[in-house]
């Protein structure tokens, strides 16, 4: 990883594997398998409520997600100019996330340019340089609107701030108050976070992950980098 990595470990809780069982971390994507400047095609676009293959048709000069390289390390960059941009990965078949064995989600990110004046606790200013969504539904049905945890890199709010928009809970996991431009590693115990935010255990298998950047409310620019998205067993 190029540059200094600042470790941020928040909301850790133990979900131990069965006695004698060695559970390994699962790498979802480190973006090393793509060509530089290419789209991260293991991820998908969302079109009319469905996930579809990621193609150039979903991007333009104001919004893009593509693979970049720096000092021999590849990562994905999200760019949004007065837009919201995202890519998605569904749980299975590309990766199988069972929160009972892998409650922790880990990733590296870096804010390059933050949407000016944005703050996630005000709907009219609700933009984020970077967001990591986790979407859940009730086991076996999509009838009820999914519950969502969105971890964000905030332009203005301190780490630990929580904003609630019904079934969407926004958690500030990094903040410009602590600086920008350096890689940070975030680890979240998603099971414990879900319990804290929704007052119950999460579904065993989340629906999907989403990498996000947006600047449409502030009509500014958001640029952020993501790398090394992983699932880890509990401590």
Image (cartoon, rainbow, N blue to C red):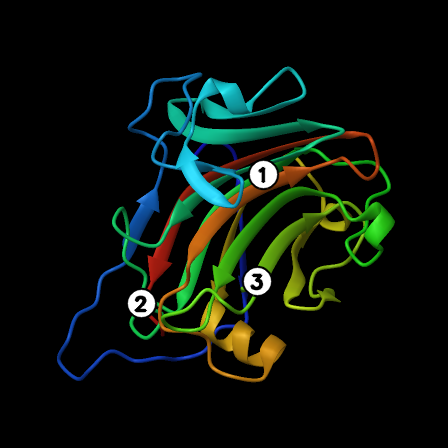
> Which is more foreground, mark 2 or mark 3?
3
Q: CA distance from mark 2 to mark 3?
A: 16 Å
The residue singled out by tag 2 in the image is 98
In the rendered image, the quadrant that contains the C terminus is bottom left
Marks 3 and 1: CB-CB under 8 Å?
Answer: no
**Residue at point 86%, 48% (across, down):** 124
x and y, in percent, of residue 11 in the image: 54, 72
The residue singled out by tag 3 in the image is 148
Q: CA distance from mark 3 to mark 1?
A: 22 Å
> Which is more foreground, mark 1 or mark 2?
2
In the rendered image, the quadrant that contains the N terminus is top left
Mark found first going from the N terminus, 2 or 3? 2
Tell me the element at label 3. Answer: strand
Given residues 167 and 224, the one toward you in this image is 167
Q: Which mark is residue 110?
A: 1
Give the quarter of the image for residue 80: top right
x and y, in percent, of residue 150 in the image: 60, 57
Tell me the element at label 2. Answer: loop
Look at the image and tell me whether residue 92 can be seen.
yes
Mark found first going from the N terminus, 1 or 2? 2
**Residue at point 51%, 19% (across, down):** 57
Q: CA distance from mark 1 to mark 2?
A: 27 Å
Q: Is residue 193 above or below residue 127?
A: below
């Amino acid at each position: 990883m190029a540059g200094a990595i600042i470790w941020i470990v928040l909301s850790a809780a133990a979900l131990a594997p069965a006695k004698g069982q060695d559970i390994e971390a699962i790498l979802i994507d480190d973006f090393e398998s793509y060509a530089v400047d290419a789209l991260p095609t293991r991820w998908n676009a969302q079109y009319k409520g469905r996930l579809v293959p990621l193609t150039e048709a979903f991007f333009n000069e104001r919004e893009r997600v593509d693979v970049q390289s720096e000092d021999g390390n590849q990562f994905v960059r999200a760019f949004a100019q007065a837009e919201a941009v995202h890519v998605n990965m569904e749980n299975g078949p590309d990766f199988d996330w069972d929160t009972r064995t892998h409650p922790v989600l880990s990733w590296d990110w870096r804010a390059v340019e933050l949407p000016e004046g944005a703050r996630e606790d005000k709907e009219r200013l609700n933009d984020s340089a970077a967001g990591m969504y986790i979407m859940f539904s009730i086991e076996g049905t999509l009838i009820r609107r999914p519950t969502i945890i969105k971890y964000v890199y905030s332009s203005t709010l301190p780490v630990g701030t929580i904003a609630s928009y019904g079934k969407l809970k926004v958690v500030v996991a990094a903040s410009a108050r602590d600086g920008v431009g350096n890689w940070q590693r975030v680890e979240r115990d998603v099971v414990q976070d879900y319990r804290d935010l929704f007052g119950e255990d999460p579904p065993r298998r989340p629906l999907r992950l989403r990498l996000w950047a947006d600047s449409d409310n502030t009509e500014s620019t958001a640029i952020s980098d993501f790398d090394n998205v992983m699932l880890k067993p509990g401590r």
